[in-house]
Every structure is written in C-alpha cells, then in structure tokens.
Amino acid sequence: MSRIQALVVAVLINVSVFLGAQRTSLRPPITGIAKVSVYASDIGKSRQFYGDLLGFSRIGPDASATPLEYRVNSMQSIKVAPLPNGETDDLAYVAFATSNADSLRRYLLSQKVPVEGEIQTQASGAQFFWAKDPEGHQIQFVQLPTRGHLLPVAEKGAGTPEEPISHHILHAGFVVQDRAAEDRFFRDILGFREGWQGGSREGRTDWIDMQVPDGTDWIEYMMHNPAAKTASQSGVVNHFALGVPDIHQAANLLLQRHWNASAREEPQLGRDGKWQLNLYDPDGTRVELMEFGPVRTPCCSPYTLRPPKQVPN
C-alpha cells in the first residue's frame, strides 16, 4: 500500500470514528427497561399469577380495571392487557427509559427510524412515544418525571403477599430472524452493546445479550427458533427476566405461596453461568427468575455484561 493510499484509509477511519461518536453524542441516555407488557386471555388467572404468586402490587385504585399494571420498583412495571383477537405473540411490547423523550424522538427521526405519532404524556407526568424495530417488535421509549419516580407506591390487594418475588426487571428477550438488521437498530443507532452470546451446545449461537448503553438491563436476541410464531412457541421464546439474589430461596418462597410447579419449572444452572428458574404465566409466557451474576464461568464467549445495580424500590 502506498503512502497516499495509507493516508486515505487513515482519514476514512478517523472520519468514521468521528461520525460514530458524533451520532452517539446526539442520542440522549437510554438507562434501562421501564416496562414489559404482556397479553392475557384470562385476566383473572393473570391477576392470581402476577399478584398472588409473584407478589407484585397493582398500580391504580380500581381493582377491577384493565389493563392491569404491577409495580416492580419505582421505575419499572409489568403491564397485563387483554389479548386482542388474532394476536399470537403474548409479549406486547418493551419500554426503555430515557432522560429526554423529545430529543430521542428527534434523533431517531434523523436516523430514518419510523416513529409512530407524537409524544404522549401520562397522568404521572411521564412522557413516551412509540417505534418499531426492524422486525416489527413494538418498542416504547419513556422519560421519567422530573421528580425521578415513574410509579407511585401501589396498593396491595387482599391476596397479595407482603414481599414481591423480585425488585428488578433484568432483561427481555424476543425472536430475531435478521441479526444484522437488529444490530443496525439496537447497536449502531441506539448504542446497545453486546455483553455475551451463547448456545445450547458448542458452536451454536442461540442467544445474544445486548445491554442498554447507559445502564445494566439488557435485551436478548433469541436466535434459535426464528419460526416461533404461534402463541405456544412465542410465549416460551419471547420472555422477560426478574432478578433475584438466590434462586433456591425464591423457589422456596413460591412453594410457600402454594406454587404448583411443573416438571419444566425447577432451578437450573444456565449456559451463562447463572442460576435461573423458568416460570410460565397462565398464557404460557415465560417469566424467568435469574440470579444477578454468574456463579461459574459462562460458556461460549467472553462475558462483558456490566453487573446489574440495585434498583430503588
């Protein structure tokens, strides 16, 4: 390579790095998962699962109102909405917290990302807007109120245990068919960073963990079953995870609440080196209990996920 060619290559690299840094600087922080929303065919059964078994308190004064929303901590919640006719995916959407919804919306538009409608404001003062990733997954971006609390202290129902099973939504996962397209959206535009990838056996990539750029929560590309489009399949693959300090203590707590465990619901050590326990809500949506960090070296690839921080209750 001549000196002139080398100089041209160096200039192009520097320009690329500069433009990438400039684009990242224009994006306001994305700090974590604010909400996961699932569909339910029987609201009463879902109320028993999320309220009576998992112990989450409902947000809102009307115990009979739908959709249901359960408080995980002051900045995260789980929403349970009636299943629309013809819907086969029980994971309705994932919401990410940002420090500035308006700036993020304008940034996404500048990157040619389709944004749905204008910014809306909730009664709490939180602002949000909608977008979709390249594969059509519904995404919401939420700006917390200036007082720093998205969710009020919720009232406990008559059957709600005193202590919820978890105080932190760690991650959400969904089917990905085109990794390159998802990477362009989550990594290149939004700034997510790969923290680990692995598979059910050596030489296979089934799961790719992508951590939010300004926090410790992550999403999980579920690569192993891209054809999972029926409710029975997608509910297992499309899922969310709740952090617990000790998986065996969590299992014992569920048993005390008369948990009727199935053969596939038992503590196991995952390929990522973490203890986990897969629960399934009444519609088959997987709710994964997961310890915060690995207890052994994860398989398959370097593990660079930043450890989750304690989320205020």
Image (cartoon, rainbow, N blue to C red):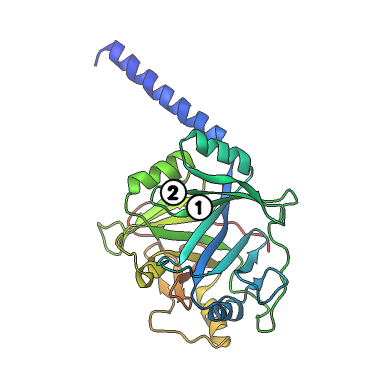
Labelled disc at residue 133: 2
The foreground one among 64 and 202 is 64
Q: Position of residue 251 (x, y in %)?
A: 51, 80
Number of residues whose C-alpha sits closer than 10 Å to that of mark 1, classed few (under 14), some (14–19) or many (20 or more): some
Residue positioned 34% across, 44% down in the render:
180
Nearer-N-terminus badge (2/1):
2
Residue picked out by circle 1: 139
Q: What quarter of the picture does the N terminus occupy?
A: top left
What amino acid type is highlighted by mark number 2? Asp
The correct choice, above or below, for 55 with respect to 214 in the image is: below
What amino acid type is highlighted by mark number 1? Ile
What is the spatial separation of the Cα atoms under label 2 and label 1, in whole angstroms?
7 Å
Q: Position of residue 260 (x, y in %)?
A: 48, 87
The correct choice, above or below, for 126 with respect to 14 in the image is: below
Q: Position of residue 274 (x, y in %)?
A: 44, 66
Residues at badges 2 and 1 in contact (C-beta under 8 Å)? yes
The foreground one among 102 and 304 is 102
Q: Position of residue 85 (x, y in %)?
A: 45, 69
Tell me the SS state at disc 2: loop
* In the image, farthest residue toward the right: 147
The correct choice, above or below, for 138 with respect to 78 in the image is: above
